[in-house]
């Protein structure tokens, strides 16, 4: 990973904000900038220096698993940022990523640093993280490859009697077996539970006639995959087919609307209008997609964002009908000058299929 | 409904603080008050009404579980606050609310007065109700069962990461929805690092191996530590281990309503001091556990135990380069005393994996 370039880009952003130093507190941004993956620490950056302040639990990781930063180790749970800023002679204006700094922490910094102007910079690192470089795209493609493969392998286990929790656990195990460094979340939602967009797996056993909606991913080299597919167990009803095919067409339309310069609103509209025309507008009650990398971050596929080449985004429309169930189909891909290059390659049948039926 | 009792308690506390209501942004506090545990929800509590503000992904679930709350979708927090009558004084949570969100709120709110109040719900959460105790007890039982199942795998040659993966899978197989926190498996010299990052080191003869882990069950966590020994312990291994054992057992036995946390912590420290290792017990004796793995009350100065407290008791001795020992249970303060919720066997002397009698 090209950490040198990233720190340089952040320093350019500091110059734009007319600050002499910046404090980065968000975990994913810190990992992005220097490789550090610990759960406690902040990055304090000046024009010349980059300090990673953390505690003794992460001393070894801060030394051996980072690039371009000087580890500074303090006591566990202590507030280290004001001291670091003072020692670095950070100057009179300091930017901080205000969406990761609590009000209580800010008050503590203000009290400890009279005479320093603390400049809130929401999304400080977001514009840099938004455009993925080749190393990042390779890591995400590998994470997607693992997830795709596990989706195919799990097909034989999506049978009546299998519980949601058991399937979620199998997804986690299989992804680890195939080289993921961690399994991410896993939503396995069967039957009526599939009507909950963000269902938490339960001990409900899959029954004949169920939609089974599976939304899961893994982490490879720090980067996430994210995939959703929906199958039916046993015979599908006409209504289930109609819902599925509508979501499928919306997902294809959404992907087709993506290109560098497209607004989140345009892409959302392309997918949402398909669902609205089919009469399910009310039952698609979430955003079309989100940015992803080390974590979720902008740009999202929502009004207010403009897509650019190199953004990694999901396209994931859904229809959720209380009592009946729901369908979502999701791919993760890269925005290019002309379109959407999907990193997800799991089979995506245009018609509602039983597990493994398309193979 | 327990959640409504919790809300009533919160409202009473707010009024003691001179606030009319509150904005609750901490995910765990939202779940505590509503039963709703989605990733995007904020509460606006006002006299006579309470709103759960979330987005469409959680609509059905929020309406089902958050009884007594008006589920509000697609509105900004400021919009909801602006609907409240009068000029309500609303407490927010400064240790959870980010600076960005506060700025947005302040820009959008017209009449309400916003003021920081730390730890209000955290203090209420320190005393668990019976529903919560039942869930922590289940999380503790899952960890105990997984620990028993892991014993045959703790053999020379296996790595720390392999053991931690197996332990976590065993907890999930027994109904855990996740882990209480990242499991620590620390072997040999690594056992001298209290918060060792589990790595690729292989278990060998002569190792202490410390396992610090817990299960997550329906939003509640357990926390336990056991240290096993592979091979033939030396006198020093026996001395260090047994000092930690006695410190753990004797201090935990003191816990009861009215007892001070400081006295309990002093008891553990005295025993370790008598053994000559005071300098090497480098952390506090324990902490509250519940929805968060570290919550109130701490086992130390300022705490007087009450029925419903759930705390860890976890003394340790850490000798750099040589190894360390920690033993920990999750302990529930009852009306008349206390009892451990984690009940795995706890030998008095350094013992190989699978030893069941004390």
Image: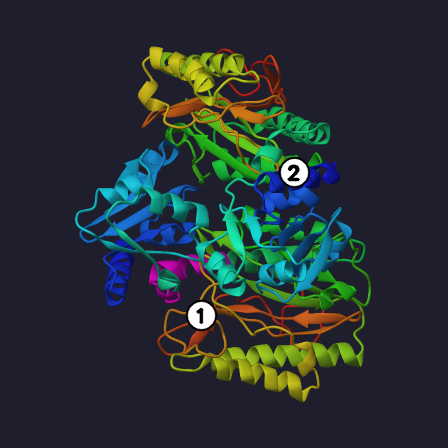
Residue drawn 67% across the image and 39% down it: A176
Q: Which span of residues is magenta-colored? A: B123-140
Chain containing mark 2: A
Front residue (pair B100, A345): B100
- How many numbered discs sit on the rendered protein? 2
Numbered mark located on residue B101 in the image: none
Depth check: give the residue in front, A298 or B50. A298
Name the colour scheme.
rainbow
Q: Is residue A276 above or below residue B351?
A: above
Q: Which mark is residue A12?
A: 2
Residue A188 picture location, percent across and down: 49, 33
The residue marked by circle 1 belongs to what chain? B
Q: CA distance from mark 1 to mark 2?
A: 45 Å
Q: Based on the displayed image, in which of its 4 quarters is residue B7 positioned?
A: bottom left
Tag 1, which secondary structure?
loop
Tell me if residue B64 can be seen.
no
Q: Dominant secondary structure of the magenta stretch?
A: helix
State left or right for residue B123 relative to residue A350: left
Q: Can residue A199 be seen by looking at this rendering? A: yes
Few, some or many residues within 10 Å of mark 1 (<14, 14–19, 20+) = many
Is residue B132 on the magenta stretch? Answer: yes
Q: Which residue has dot 1 on it? A: B297
Q: Nearer the viewer, residue B131 or B26?
A: B26
| Left or right: residue A50 compared with residue A309 | right
Mark 2 secondary-structure assignment: helix
Residue B335, image x and y in percent?
Answer: 35, 75
Q: Position of residue A1 (x, y in %)?
A: 74, 36
The location of residue B60, given as percent across then percent down, is: 32, 34
Circle 1 or circle 2, nearest the eye = 2
């Amino acid at each position: 990973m090209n950490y040198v370039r990233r720190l340089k880009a952040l320093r350019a952003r500091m110059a734009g904000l007319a600050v002499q130093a910046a404090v980065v507190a968000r975990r994913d941004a810190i990992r992005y900038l220097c490789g550090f993956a610990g759960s406690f620490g902040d990055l304090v950056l000046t024009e010349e220096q980059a300090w990673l302040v953390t505690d003794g639990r992460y001393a070894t990781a801060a030394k051996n698993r980072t690039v371009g930063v000087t580890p500074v180790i303090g006591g566990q749970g202590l507030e280290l940022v004001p001291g670091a800023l003072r020692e670095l002679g950070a100057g009179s204006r300091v930017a901080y990523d205000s969406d990761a700094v609590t009000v209580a922490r800010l008050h503590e910094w203000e009290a400890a640093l009279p005479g320093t102007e603390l400049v809130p910079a929401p999304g400080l690192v977001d514009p840099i993280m938004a455009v993925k470089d080749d190393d990042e795209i390779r890591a995400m493609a590998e994470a997607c490859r693992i997830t795709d493969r596990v989706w195919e392998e799990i097909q034989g286990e999506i049978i009546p009697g299998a519980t949601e929790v058991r399937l979620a656990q199998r997804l986690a195990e299989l992804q680890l077996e195939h080289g993921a460094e961690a399994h991410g979340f896993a939503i396995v939602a069967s039957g009526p539970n599939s009507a909950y967009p963000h269902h938490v797996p339960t001990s409900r056993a899959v029954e004949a006639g169920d939609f089974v909606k599976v939304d899961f991913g893994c982490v490879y080299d720090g980067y996430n995959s994210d995939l959703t597919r929906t199958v039916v167990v046993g015979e599908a009803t006409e209504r289930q087919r109609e819902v599925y095919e509508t979501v499928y067409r919306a997902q294809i339309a959404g992907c087709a609307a993506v290109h560098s310069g497209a607004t989140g609103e345009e892409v959302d509209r392309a997918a949402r209008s398909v669902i609205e025309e089919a009469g399910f507008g009310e039952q698609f009650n979430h955003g079309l997609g989100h940015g992803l990398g080390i974590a979720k971050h902008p740009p999202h596929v929502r009004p207010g964002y403009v897509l650019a080449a190199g953004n990694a985004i999901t396209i994931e429309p859904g229809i959720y009908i209380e009592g009946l169930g729901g369908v979502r189909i999701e791919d993760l891909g890269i925005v290019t000058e002309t379109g959407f290059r999907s990193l997800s390659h799991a089979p995506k049948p245009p018609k509602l299929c039983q597990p493994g039926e398309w193979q | 409904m327990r959640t409504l009792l919790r809300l009533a308690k919160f409202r009473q506390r707010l009024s003691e603080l001179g606030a009319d209501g509150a904005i609750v942004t901490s995910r765990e506090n939202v779940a505590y008050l509503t039963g709703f545990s989605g990733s995007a929800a904020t509460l606006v509590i006002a006299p006579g009404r309470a709103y759960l503000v979330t987005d469409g992904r959680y609509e059905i679930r929020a309406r089902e579980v958050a009884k007594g709350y008006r589920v509000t979708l697609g509105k900004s927090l400021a919009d909801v606050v602006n609907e409240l009558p009068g000029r309500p004084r609303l407490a927010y949570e400064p240790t959870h609310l980010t600076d960005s969100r506060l700025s947005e709120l302040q820009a959008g709110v017209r009449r309400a007065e916003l003021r920081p109040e730390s730890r209000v719900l955290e203090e209420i959460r320190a005393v668990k109700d019976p529903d919560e105790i039942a869930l922590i007890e289940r999380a503790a039982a899952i960890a105990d069962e997984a620990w028993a199942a892991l014993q045959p795998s703790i053999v020379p040659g296996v790595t720390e990461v392999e053991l931690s993966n197996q332990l976590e899978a065993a907890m999930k197989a027994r109904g855990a929805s996740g882990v209480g926190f990242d499991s620590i498996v620390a072997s040999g010299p690594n056992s001298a690092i209290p918060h060792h990052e589990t790595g690729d080191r292989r278990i060998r003869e002569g190792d202490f191996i410390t396992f610090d882990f817990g299960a997550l069950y329906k939003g509640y966590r357990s926390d336990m530590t056991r240290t096993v020994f592979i091979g033939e312990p030396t006198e020093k291994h026996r001395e260090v281990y047994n000092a930690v054992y006695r410190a753990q057992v004797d201090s935990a036995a003191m816990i009861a309503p009215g007892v001070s946390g400081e006295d309990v912590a002093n008891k553990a420290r005295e025993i370790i001091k008598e053994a000559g290792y005071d300098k090497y017990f480098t952390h506090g004796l324990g902490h509250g556990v519940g929805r968060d793995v570290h919550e109130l009350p701490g086992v130390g100065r300022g705490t007087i135990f009450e029925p419903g407290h759930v705390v860890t008791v976890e003394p340790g001795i850490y000798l750099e380069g040589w190894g360390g020992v920690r033993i920990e249970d999750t302990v529930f303060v009852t009306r008349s005393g206390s009892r451990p919720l984690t009940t795995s066997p706890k030998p008095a002397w350094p013992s190989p994996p699978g030893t069941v009698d004390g």
